[in-house]
Structures are given as C-alpha cells and as structure tokens.
Image (cartoon, rainbow, N blue to C red):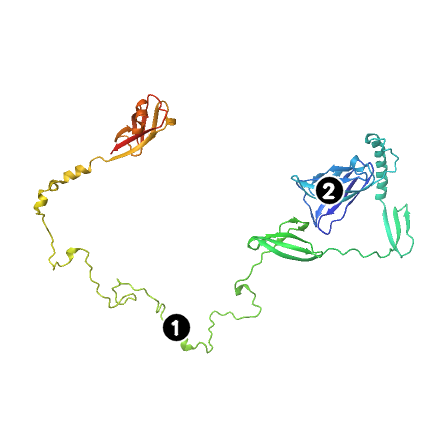
Amino acid sequence: MIQTKTVDITPMKITLPVIEMSQYDLGREIIIHMKDGSDWFDLTGYTAKLQGTKPSGFGYTVDGVVDGHDITFASNYDMTSEAGFIPSEVRLTKDGVSLGSLNVILHVEKTPHDVNVTDGSPETIVPEITELVERAEAAAEVLLDCSAIATTLPAGSNATASYDVDEGVFTFGIPRGNKGDTGDTGVGISSITKTGTSGLVDTYTITYTNGNTTTFTVTNGQNGTGSVSDVLQNGVSVLDGNVAKVTVPTKTSDLTNDSDFVADSSYVHTDNNYTTTEKNKLSGIASGAEVNVQSDWNQTTTTADDYIKNKPTIPTVPTNVSAFTNDAGYITGYTETDPVFAASPAHGITSANISSWNGKASVSSITVSLVVANWSNNSQTVTATGVTASNNVIVSPAPASIDNYVAAGIKCTAQGSGTLTFTCTTTPSTAISVNVVILS
C-alpha cells in the first residue's frame, strides 16, 4: 500500500505529519506532497533524505526520489526494525547546501507475530513479515469499504460502539468531554510596514505579537506594470500577483463632467477688474510693438529699427610713419661716408663671405662607454646621439682608457643613425670610454 501525506509549508499552517508503519514493513512507498499556500512547492533541483533516531539510539536514513512537488520514500529494515514513535525529519538539500528540514513522526507499530529479532536476520524473517503484511492489507481493504457515524453524548455518559455487518457501518457514541485548559497565547501579526526601498525593490518588515520580526521583499514593475516576485525568506511566502497599471488624468477632458461645468473657449471675463476700454486699448497695439532691438552700426536705412542716429565720424588711425607729415625735419635717408669704417677690415665683408661662413660645419662631442658584457664575437654597437650614416666623426679613447683601448685592438668600423660599431682583436676586461667628435 502507498501512504501519502500533504504538507503546507506556509508559516502558521505547518502541522506535524505522522507516518504510520508496521514493524518490519519493507518496501512500502511514502509520498509527501509539498504545498506553499494554494500552490504546489516546486522541488526541482532538490535532493531529500528521511532520517531519524530509533528508541535504541541507532539512526536510520532513507534516500528520497524527488519529482515536481512530490518526494517518495521506500521503507527498509533499518527504518522499521524497532517499534515506537521515532522523531524524524525530511532534510532538503540543493547544490550541496542544506536548505531546511520538515519534522515528522514515524510511528512504527509493534508486530503481533512472535519473531526472534535478536537471533534472526532480515533474510530469515522477511517471508514471515511478508505474510503478515499481506494479511494486514486484506484486513485494511475490508476496512476501506466501511463507514462510520459518530454521535456526541451528554457529558458523563458511557461511550458506545456498534457495527452493522450487513451495511458495513460503525456507530460510535462519544460523551462530551470537559472543557480543557486554555492554551498558550498564539503568535499573531502586529503590523506589516515598508522599511526600505532599493530601485524597484521594496523591503517590508512583519512584526509579530511576541516581538519577533521577519522581512520580505516586493519587486515593483516599471512604468506602472509588473508582478510581485515569489519570495520564500525567513519562512514568509509571497505568492505571484499582477500589479495593475493606473493611469492618472492630466487634463480636465479626461474627467467625467458630472457637475455640468461650462466649457466655452470664446468666454471673456467682463467684471470691473478689466474694462472694455482697457480691452480696446490692448487690441490697438501692433504685433511686436516695443520689442527690444539690438542696434547695428552698419545700418544705413534711417527708417529701420536698428538704425543709429547722429553717429560720430571716426578718423583713420595711421599705422605707418610715412602717413605722418614730417614737419620736424627727421632724416629720411643716409649714405655711410665714415672714413674710419672704410679703412676697417669689416668694410670688405661681402654677402658671399657671410653665406660661406654660415655653411661651415658645426662641431659637437659625446662620450660613449664600451661595456665588457656587451662584446659579442669581438663586436659591440653603442648608442651615439647626433651621429648619422653620412656625417664625419673623429673617434679617440679617453685618456684613462688609451692603454686598454690599444691593447685590445679596438677600432670604430661602422656608423649608422644614432649608432657606432666597434670591433676588437681581444675582448677587454674593463669598460672603455671613447670620445666622439661629430662634424655636421
């Protein structure tokens, strides 16, 4: 037989399910339907285990099969070997993270069959248990066809019970019991208040009557439309719901004129605050009258609004000396006739001489260092700023490097753009400083 349980995980609605089993009941299917309010709770991606601790202190674990909103477990020997009420839980895990558990009670009823569990083994007692299960299932099928009628009797009466074999009806008389003690005060909700907003997400805080609080979020839609997202946070469930778009009127024509207001575009207010004379005066003003106009110095039409009257004549300011009258008799031309200058060597300098001097080569100098580590195959190229592939250079060792320069047989053998290449017959053991004169 299959045993099913439907569990609503909505806060304040969770009840403690009791799973009824017989001792040594093997292979019985237990199906738990998970609900969240009026909707089924989607378990896609979850794994489930049913686990608990038996009266002996030993534990048991049964792996479940998850399908949609259902979890199916199959009973085994570890689960039903001991009779009694066994506190258990359904542990839910997703992506390796434990997300919570559902407490259940496993009630294992002791078998009436005399089986020596201590000396026996599951393999030897299974046939006997199977027979008991089949007999119990046959009896259960008879009970499933029965019905029951219960009647409340006055307090103090004796309970009654009868069974009609022909009709398959149980009749029970149950005396009214004494009023029980008042239970503990329950926990209710004191308030739900919006306590924060981030973008489209509003945060609400639920305050319970015992002072505890929890929060949930609501995602608002853009431009007046949207939906409330499913939330399952701290035990609070918010179900899907559409948020209607509300159009706010911006013109009187959007409203229903239930007060019969007059709509007349030609209506003119005529009380004493505005007389007919004043209206006529305003009507006689030309369009654009007295509009501010920016003056134009170059405007020559005298009737134009931007014409400037009585402009002064601005004289022309001379920019050359020749524009002035030389009334003071300043020298305007002179020929050198100094006999001392004619006798000096400078008197004989011509333009050709000056051009020839300007074309003379310029001279600059640099010092380069031939580092020991940079010799490769008795050759080394160094950076020489100012050297080109075609200008003239004079290369000589610095005084402190003359002996090592000569001993190593160093020569400058090539030049390029910004470089000089040196070769040697033997690699020197110290750095060599070389002075370079560049003729441009």
- Residue 395, position in %: x, y? 27, 28
Relative horizontal placement of residue 147, taking residue 46 as reference (left or right): right
Query: In the rendered image, is residue 27 in sight?
Result: no
Nearest-to-viewer mark from 1 and 2 = 2
**Label drawn at residue 283:** 1
Relative horizontal placement of residue 3, taking residue 432 as reference (left or right): right
Relative horizontal placement of residue 296, taking residue 134 as reference (left or right): left
Mark 1 to mark 2: distance in Å? Answer: 89 Å
Quarter assignment of residue 283: bottom left
- Nearer to the camera, 113 or 2: 113
The image shows residue 204, relative to residue 306, as above or below, that is above
**Label drawn at residue 372:** none
Element type at mark 1: helix
Element type at mark 2: strand
Q: Which residue lies furthest to the bottom in this view?
A: 272
Identify residue type, mark 2: Val
Quadrant that contains the N terminus: top right
Q: Name the residue under label 2.
A: 90
The image shows residue 184, relative to residue 138, as above or below, that is below
- Nearer to the camera, 254 or 374: 374
How many badges with numbers are in the image?
Answer: 2
- Residue 226, position in %: x, y? 59, 52
- Residue 294, position in %: x, y? 32, 64
- Nearer to the camera, 201 or 319: 319
Task: Kindly identify the residue that appears in the image at 34 percent across and 26 percent down.
Answer: 380
Task: Kindly identify the residue that appears in the image at 73 percent across and 45 percent down.
Answer: 102
